[in-house]
């Protein structure tokens, strides 16, 4: 099966870098029935953590965040990749961008029985060219 690469919306929320903040954010989204395709969290310094969320339904996420009192970033775009797990799967995706002269600003991936998935972020100004390079 060929890799499936699609454009996705993502948002982030900044929270204090302390225990329980991830549970608070992700728990509120769970309670609202928001399905996430991916998320990642990392410290940004000065006692803050950024939680990036990639929802299956961006409108459901924005409604849930508003109801939970969460301040979301403006909507941005990334690429969501799914395919059959194999050696070098992530490198193949990143090579397409590199060959087009596009820098992947960040990427996260995971593999499980038979499959892999990854999210790839590029500069928003490179998004259209990256979509063309990836066939998304």
Image (cartoon, helix red, strand yellow):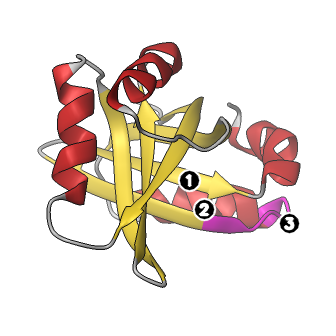
For disc 1, the marked residue is: 120
Of 5 and 45, nearer the camera is 45
- Residue 73: percent from left, percent from top: 61, 44
- Residue 34: percent from left, percent from top: 30, 21
Mark 2 residue crowding within 10 angstroms, few (<14) / some (14–19) / many (20+): some
Magenta highlight on residue 102: yes
Q: Quadrant of residue 77?
A: top right
Would residue 135 be found to the left or right of residue 37 on screen? right
For disc 3, the marked residue is: 101
Quick one: SS at disc 2? helix
Quadrant that contains the C terminus:
top right
Quick one: SS at disc 3? loop
Give, as a single range, the part of the protein colored magenta: 99-105
Q: Quadrant of residue 60?
A: top left
Q: Is residue 132 above or below residue 56?
A: below
Alpha-carbon distance for marks 2 and 3? 11 Å
Mark 2 and 1 residues: CB-CB less than 8 Å, in contact?
yes
Q: Residue at x 60, y 62 (%)?
A: 94
């Amino acid at each position: 099966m060929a890799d499936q690469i699609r454009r996705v919306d993502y948002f982030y929320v900044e929270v204090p870098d302390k225990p329980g903040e991830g549970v608070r954010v992700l728990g509120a989204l769970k309670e609202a029935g928001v399905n996430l395709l991916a998320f990642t969290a990392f410290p940004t310094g000065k006692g803050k953590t950024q939680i990036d969320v990639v929802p299956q339904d961006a409108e459901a996420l924005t409604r849930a965040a508003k109801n939970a009192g969460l301040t979301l970033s403006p909507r941005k775009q990334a690429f969501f990749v799914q395919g059959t797990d194999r050696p070098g799967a992530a490198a193949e995706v990143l090579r397409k961008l590199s060959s087009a002269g596009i820098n992947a600003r960040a990427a996260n991936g995971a593999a499980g029985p038979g499959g892999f998935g990854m999210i790839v972020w590029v500069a928003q100004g490179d998004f259209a060219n990256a979509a063309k390079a990836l066939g998304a």
